[in-house]
Amino acid sequence: MIFILFFILCLLHIIKVNAQLSPSYRKLHSAVLVEKKLYIFGGFNGIILTPEIEANYNNNPDDRFFYLDVSIPFDTSYLPWRPIPDNARNLPLGSLSSIATGGVAASIGGVNNDTIFFINNESDNATKSFSPVHTYNSPDNVWNTENLTGVRPIGRNQMRVVTDYTGKIYLLTGFDFTFQGVTRSDGLFVCDTINLNCEIKDASVFSRLGYGVTLLPNGMIVYMGGGDRNYVANPTGFQMIFIYDPSNDRWDSKITTGSFPPPDVGITTVLGLSGDKIILFGGDNGDSKDLYVLNITNYEWYMPKVRGKGPIYRRGEHCANVIGKYMVITFGSNGVNGAKYKDNGESDVLLLDISDDSEYIWTTSFDPTPLAIDSPSSTSPPSNLKQKTNNTGIIIGVTVGAIPTPGDTETTEVIPTPGDTDATEGIPSERDLLSRRI
């Protein structure tokens, strides 16, 4: 009898963990890939946001923090959203920054690259005594607070966050703030998630919100697009891009050519699977075109060849992650008024197959089968990036009227292919979970 009761309880637990969720529409959320789970945190779905409305959101913790199971095949008409065990009891919503004050920034980090770092905004940093950094360890389902040495970082949901191959999170503030008694008009917070310290770097050349940020295989970080604190798009946002060299703490700019995207905010950019292209999707303004590609061997923009049924409505303030061979786009808004795509019957998740640079494919089917790549390179990208010499992992071509890329040398090194880990593993990317940090 006791065994039967134990079996029933275990079965109920399994059913609960694998239950199907129906999350609400949202924008300005965070999406972080940890192994085979795409975690979604926060966001909101209205034009007006008050503490009372946010309190209603927080009444349903499973709609605040949950994940998409990317270990299995699925169709976007029936998404495998999953609740997090004991979420109602463990999720520290009272200690995480309010959406009404700007929310949090979130990114992957930690020694084993399996921990999400949540960084509170400047309002809560100034008024609350608890740590501005909270972490969620995915394998253990455990929340912690982290006391970073150095400066107290600032995170917001309008910041695009990136983690490099050495476990450092980069948060570009994009607005004026007074912090620790010093007034700054800009800044780039660099948070070391392994040694748990934080410092601030100058970012006066690029002070924006709603921008795109992309980590290149050689460790450089590319910023583009975006606008001011009122979300007015920078008129040259894609005609000139900015590249930050973390190892030398140096900013450079590049003039681009080709078919520029129109000025825009609320965009996303991801690194293509070949490692030499940046794919831009969506935005709040712009034109009716959703996709542009920047070839970073010659800094030329073009509109890619695409087939399949793509989204009817443009999306901004969404998230985009590279998972396996797909650019996975989650939620987002259609301008200020929100979710036209929902009324049109489109899914909260869009899938773009980016495995072939000559033709991308919009699809509704996700296949976690490992991507078979015929490539002259079988090396994992950042095996030499932790030492971060001036050897670059990308062949940089002709620069048009701009400063040479930091670390440029005469090299014929092939671009490392993401996904070149054990072929039986399947799925990841996000540069193969930052190359397993070896």
Image: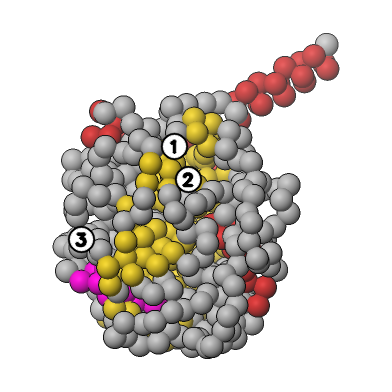
User: Which x, y percent locates residue 323?
Assistant: 53, 49
Q: Which residue is drawn at 61% across and 30% down?
A: 17
What is the spatial separation of the Cα atoms under label 3 and label 1, in whole angstroms? 26 Å
Residue located beneath label 1 in the image: 363
Q: Residue 262 bears which disc, if any?
A: 3
User: Which x, y percent locates residue 372?
Assistant: 64, 49
Q: Residue at x 61, y 35 (%)?
A: 72
Q: Residue furthest top?
A: 1
| Identity, as a three-letter code, of the amino acid under mark 2 | Asp
Q: Is residue 402 left or right of residue 356?
A: left
Q: Is mark 1 on a helix, strand or loop?
A: strand
| Identity, as a three-letter code, of the amino acid under mark 1 | Thr
Q: Which of marks 3 and 2 is nearer the N terminus?
A: 3
Q: Which of marks 2 and 1 is nearer the N terminus?
A: 2
Q: Residue 372 bears which disc, if any?
A: none
The reply to whether callout 2 and callout 1 are in contact (CB within 8 Å) is yes
Q: Residue at x 19, y 55 (%)?
A: 286
